[in-house]
Image (tube, rainbow, N blue to C red):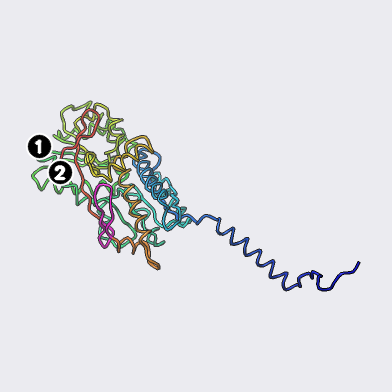
Amino acid sequence: MFFSPSRVVRAPDARCARLWVAAMLFICLFGMLACTPPEPLRIGFLGGLSGRVADLGIGGRNGATLAVEMRNQQGGINGRPIELIAEDDQQDPEVARQAVARLLARKVEVVIGPMTSAMALIVLPQFNAAGIPFISPTATTNALTAIDDQFFRVVAPTRSHVFKSAEHHFRGNGLRRVVLVCDLRNDAYTKSWADDFRQAFEGLGGQVVDAIGFASNESLAALASSVLDSKPDGVVIISNSVDSALLIQQIRMRDAAVRIGTAEWAATERLVELGGRAVEGVVVAQYVDRESKAAAYLAFLSAYRKRFGHEPGYPGLTAFDATNVALDALTARSAGQTLKQALLTHADFAGAQSPIHFDANGDTQRETFLSVIENGRFKSLY
């Protein structure tokens, strides 16, 4: 059999073979890249998720989780999904520092938290050194006011809102002789609140007859007796919901008539759950208007209840706001702009109940509200 030379198929030379292989590799690599999901944009959460203040931390984590989930349902940020990494600070300084180190190692863009002023002061140097902002839903100490740093907050410092409580207790409750009870484990907050209350209450003509500090490992029965030694007509407790509820029970066992109030820190559902009948009539300061009819708040409230099966209270709301502030700033950030610059440049953000405006130092103003516990529920006073 004979073959015509014109019909012979020649094998490709070495150069053509290399080009062919390279083209195939490029096509495969391009296909793999096209199918690889984009790297998530990571943000952190830091709060007390265990121990006596866990209601505060868990509410905050849930509010942050809801905000992230809702934003991911809308496509994330510039096509990138958002990943929330939560850490428990256990309200312990060294644990908090280690938690922040882990978050920074994960290359988070921002951290939501901490939920207490004491922890915010502890971790501030780490965030300043890293140049990463952290936005606290609930830290209100005056010690962090008007400082050019990486700290932002979506609630006002105590000196901006404690007067409202002092005025109500003096004028509305008719109190003249008050004892303040302060939780020493979060004294960055409780000292700010107590000092501002004293100044406002005594400016109105009242008298703070005693200020007693305590730690939760102390006997609350003995503390209650000490609180009543000076025969006050009112007691104002600046502590978490658990210790406030248990201390109020001890006070009521000894004096059924003395008027009692709390600072905002205690204003979670745990106060009512644990306090039972003893907390009826207690006046409670709030960071949230529980009777708000704002459409954005009602939508948040419905989504939170559906997602977690309980009330958000103020931790859920303020953490939801803080997380949305962070996500909005990340969306608006320009090329070459730090997130701190984006937060300060944007400055105005939408909260679920009210607008949030940052000044040049990352501080804001937020109204507080007063409620009284009636029939196991918070009832607004104003």
Residue located beneath label 1 in the image: 174
Residue located beneath label 2 in the image: 166
Which residue occupies the foreground of this view, 351 or 203? 351
Image x and y of residue 292, in percent = 22, 41
Circles 2 and 1, Cβ within 8 Å, touching? The answer is no
Q: Residues within 10 Å of mark 2 (few under 14, many from 20)?
A: many
Q: CA distance from mark 2 to mark 1?
A: 11 Å
The residue depicted at 12 percent of the width and 44 percent of the height is 167
The residue depicted at 10 percent of the width and 48 percent of the height is 203
Image x and y of residue 255, in percent = 18, 27
Q: Secondary structure at mark 2?
A: helix
Is 32 included in the stretch rendered in magenta? no
Q: Secondary structure at mark 1?
A: loop
Which range of residues does the magenta coloring cover?
Answer: 347-363
The residue depicted at 42 percent of the width and 53 percent of the height is 76
Residue type, mark 2 in image: Ala
